[in-house]
Image (spheres, rainbow, N blue to C red):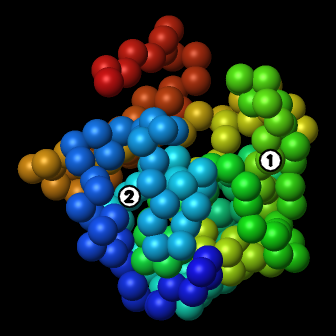
Amino acid sequence: AEGADQPGDESPPEPARKALDARSRQRIAKPARKAAAGVRAENIQRLLPDAVVPSPEQLAAYWQRVAKRALPYLARRPLTLVRHVGGVTFFHEGPLPPAPAGVRKLRIRKSGGEEGTRLWVDSLDGLLGLVSIGVVELHPWGATIDDIEHPDMIVFDLDPGEGVEWEFVIETALRLREELRQDGEVEGQHLRV
C-alpha cells in the first residue's frame, strides 16, 4: 500500500526491475506503464530504478537545515515531484494522495486541454508535508503560481556524464553563473546541449 515503504528501501522490487528496458529511461508511454509495488500505473510517469533515496528522517533533517535558503527558489512554484513509494522511485503524475498541512494545490489546464493539479509549498511545514507523502525530489517550475504562463526563472541541470568528475560539474556551474552575471557586457549566451 502507498506509504508502506520501509526506510532505506531504495530499489524497486525484482518484477519492476525486470520490466525495465532501455526505453524506461525515457518517458514511459501511457499504454506501456505497469503498476509496481502498490503504485498505480497512472501515477508513474517515469521509473527511476537507479535512484539513491534518503530516508524520510534524512529528508526531514535536510529540509529543516536548508529551508530558509531553498524556499526563495521553491516557494509559490508548481512542483514536479519524484516520489518513493513501496520501494519504487518515480516521477509522479496523475491523482495525488491527500495533501498534508502546508502543502497547497493549484488547479491548472494541461497542454492537452484536460485539468490537472500541481502541488506547491511556501513553508518548512509544506516541505515536511511533501516528505510525508513520499516526495524525495522537487523540480520547481520556472514560473510562480501567480502567473504560470510567464516564467521568471530558468534552471540549468548540470548532470555529470560517464567519466566526468563532480569537481568539473561544480567548476562548470560556477563559470556559467559568472557568465550570466555579466549584465550588459555579453550580447547573448549560447549553450551547447
Mark 1 surroundings: few (<14), some (14-19) or many (≥20) residues within 10 A: some
Name the disc covering residue 48, or none: 2
Q: Residue at x 68, y 50 (%)?
A: 94
Q: Residue at x 36, y 39 (%)?
A: 26
Observer-nearest of 59 and 91: 91
Counting from the top left corner in percent of width and height, residue 177 is at 46, 39
Q: Secondary structure at mark 1?
A: strand
Counting from the top left corner in percent of width and height, residue 155 is at 54, 39
Q: Residue at x 33, y 75 (%)?
A: 13
Q: Which residue is mark 1?
A: 117
Q: Residue at x 39, y 85 (%)?
A: 9
Q: Amino acid at mark 2?
A: Leu
Query: Relative to residue 109, is residue 176 drawn left or right?
Result: left
Q: Amino acid at mark 1?
A: Thr
Question: Which residue ends up furthest to the left in the rendered image?
Answer: 163
Counting from the top left corner in percent of width and height, residue 47 is at 41, 55
Is the C-beta separation of discs 1 and 2 under 8 Å?
Answer: no
State the CA–CA distance, disc 1 to disc 2: 22 Å
Question: Is 63 placed above or below 170 here?
Answer: below
Query: Relative to residue 160, is residue 129 drawn left or right?
Result: right
Observer-nearest of 165 and 91: 91
Q: Earlier in the sequence, mark 1 or mark 2?
A: 2
Mark 2 surroundings: few (<14), some (14-19) or many (≥20) residues within 10 A: many
Name the disc covering residue 131, or none: none
Quarter of the N terminus within the rendering: bottom right
Observer-nearest of 33 and 189: 33
Observer-nearest of 138 and 192: 138
